[in-house]
Image (spheres, grey):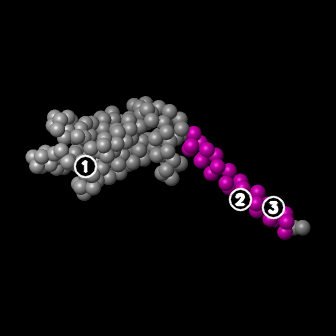
């Protein structure tokens, strides 16, 4: 009988150790959901933050940091994608001059995504220093770099803006919009 009592006592003790973790996880999920309500893209915000295990222990500033890092990964991946020439283009109606111009525009776009990554890196430093207005400006700048890329194609109407790049551009801008919403929630 005493062994059953000890076993039960150990189970109660172990269960009580788990209670703070359970409530912390629940409150962390609540913080993620509440924070994401301040953004334009709630579902993107929640799914992105939940995919990072460190978000469960993060405050609002930490959630902003996680989203900035997600933006950096996205911009870097787009830069790599453009630099590696993996983009599949329909070049049937293009002249040789068009193809040369297309290569130049794609290189310019890759460079813009590298600059976007740098701007997000600057916003991380600003977040760490709690200079939220500058963090906000750097995220806005990062979100604007793809526009420069897109405008290069608009100035050359013979060249189609690649659909794969348009999809990546939208995704990156949505991530930046989420970061801006979270920064707004910091109440600076």
Q: Judge whether 5 appears above or below 32 on screen.
A: below
Upstream in sequence: badge 2 or badge 3 = 3
Give the Cα separation between the discs numbered 1 and 3.
67 Å
Q: Which residue occupies 79% across, 60% down?
A: 9
Nearer to us in this view, 188 or 77: 77
Q: Mark 2 or 1, which is nearer the eye?
A: 1
Query: Residue 116, can we see it?
Result: no
Q: Which element carries disc 1, helix, strand or loop? A: loop
Per the image, the residue denoted by label 3 is 8
Q: Which residue occupies 27% across, 55% down?
A: 86
> Which of the image's four quarters has the N terminus?
bottom right
Tell me where residue 179 sits by quadrant.
top left
Nearer to us in this view, 54 or 59: 54
| Segment tinted magenta in the rendering | 3-30
Mark 2 surroundings: few (<14), some (14-19) or many (≥20) residues within 10 A: few
Give the Cα separation between the discs numbered 2 and 1.
59 Å
Mark 3 surroundings: few (<14), some (14-19) or many (≥20) residues within 10 A: few
Q: Which element carries disc 2, helix, strand or loop? A: helix
Per the image, the residue denoted by label 2 is 14
Per the image, the residue denoted by label 1 is 89
Upstream in sequence: badge 1 or badge 3 = 3
Q: Which element carries disc 3, helix, strand or loop? A: helix
């Amino acid at each position: 009988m005493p062994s059953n009592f000890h076993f039960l006592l150990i189970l109660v003790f172990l269960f009580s150790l788990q209670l703070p973790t359970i409530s912390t996880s629940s409150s962390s999920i609540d913080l993620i959901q509440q924070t994401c309500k301040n953004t334009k893209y709630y579902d993107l915000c929640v799914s992105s933050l939940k995919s990072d295990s460190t978000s469960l222990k993060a405050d609002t500033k930490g959630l902003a940091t996680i989203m900035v890092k997600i933006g950096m990964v996205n911009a870097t991946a787009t830069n790599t994608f453009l630099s590696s020439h993996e983009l599949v283009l329909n070049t049937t109606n293009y002249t040789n001059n068009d193809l040369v111009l297309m290569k130049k525009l794609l290189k310019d776009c890759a460079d813009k995504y590298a600059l976007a990554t740098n701007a997000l890196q600057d916003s991380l430093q600003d977040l760490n220093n709690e200079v939220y207005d500058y963090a906000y400006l750097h995220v806005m700048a990062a979100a604007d770099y793809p526009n420069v890329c897109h405008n290069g194609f608009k100035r050359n109407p013979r060249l189609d803006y690649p659909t794969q790049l348009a999809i990546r551009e939208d995704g990156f801008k949505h991530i930046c919009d989420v970061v801006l919403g979270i920064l707004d929630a910091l109440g600076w």
